Amino acid sequence: MIEQKSTVGRSDPQPPNLGGIEAKQQILDALRRHTRETYDKPDLGSLKPITFADPVAEFKTKTTTTAGARLIEVSEGADLNAVVRQAYPDAKTIASNLPAVNAQLNPDTVARAQELERADVGVIRGEIGVAENACIWIPQTMKERAVCFASEQLVIVLRADAIVSNMHEAYARIAASADYFRDYKFGTFISGPSKTADIEGALVYGAQAARGVTVVLENTR
């Protein structure tokens, strides 16, 4: 039997077993060395991001259709704990570090992130809503960010006046803020429940994160 061996990258010395930034930099350097053609970055100044006359209304529609999430509208200052309990009356374990939520698990004080896997409901606060795709910007404001992904159901609290039309506006707000990455160097956009149809085209919810998402929209107008 003839053994076939790959020669890809054979001319390069094998990198040491490094982690983090060093390994990433070695990969990028190897890609640059093997790049045969380069192209100028296109001018993106002519792009016209989509805008909406009423971003809040568009966000509501996209949240309950495209994103597949549930939407609960409340007035500013509403009893958030009561809202969560009413939405999930059978939940035994709620995880949150929001002061207004009476939680059984706190992602700031758990000994291990794995403890959050037993949360029936996780409650977090979003900072920016995007109307074009119902994404919500979630900066890490807790020690264990697993609460955003390990909870069976996820509740995202969002102010209505924090909704913008498109991702361009969202990233501009993120770049303009010095608060988002002050304590933790992580943030993510979440849009509805986790879903995938990779296997046989069958849509499965909860494959990588929350099985269901409820957006609690605090009306501020």
Image (cartoon, rainbow, N blue to C red):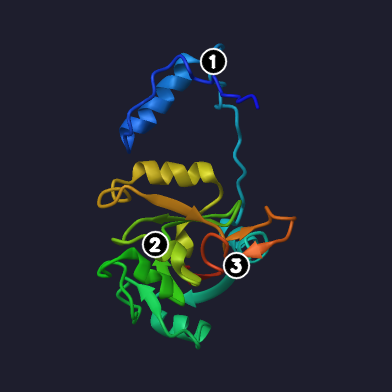
> Residue 171 location, x and y as percent?
45, 43
Would residue 38 be found to the left or right of residue 137 on screen? right
Name the residue: 47% across, 47% down: 170
Residue 138 is labelled as none
Tag 1 secondary structure: loop
Residue that extends furthest to the front in the rendered view of this protein: 1
How far across and down, in percent of the image, does residue 30 sit?
Answer: 44, 20
Q: CA distance from mark 1 to mark 2?
A: 39 Å
Query: Which mark, residue 40?
Result: 1
Count residues near mark 3 (Cα–Cα under 10 Å), then give few for <14, some for 14-19, many for 20+: many
**Amino acid at dot 1:** Asp
Q: Amino acid at mark 3?
A: Ala
**Relative to residue 146, is residue 164 depicted above or below?**
above
Identify the residue position indicated by label 2 in the image.
146
Q: x, y percentage for residue 73?
A: 53, 74
Q: Is residue 42 above or below residue 100?
A: above
The answer for how far apart the CA atoms under marks 1 and 3 are is 40 Å
- Give neighbour class at mark 1: few <14, some 14-19, many 20+ (Cα, 10 Å): few
Callout 2 environment at 10 Å: few (<14), some (14 to 19), or many (20+)? some
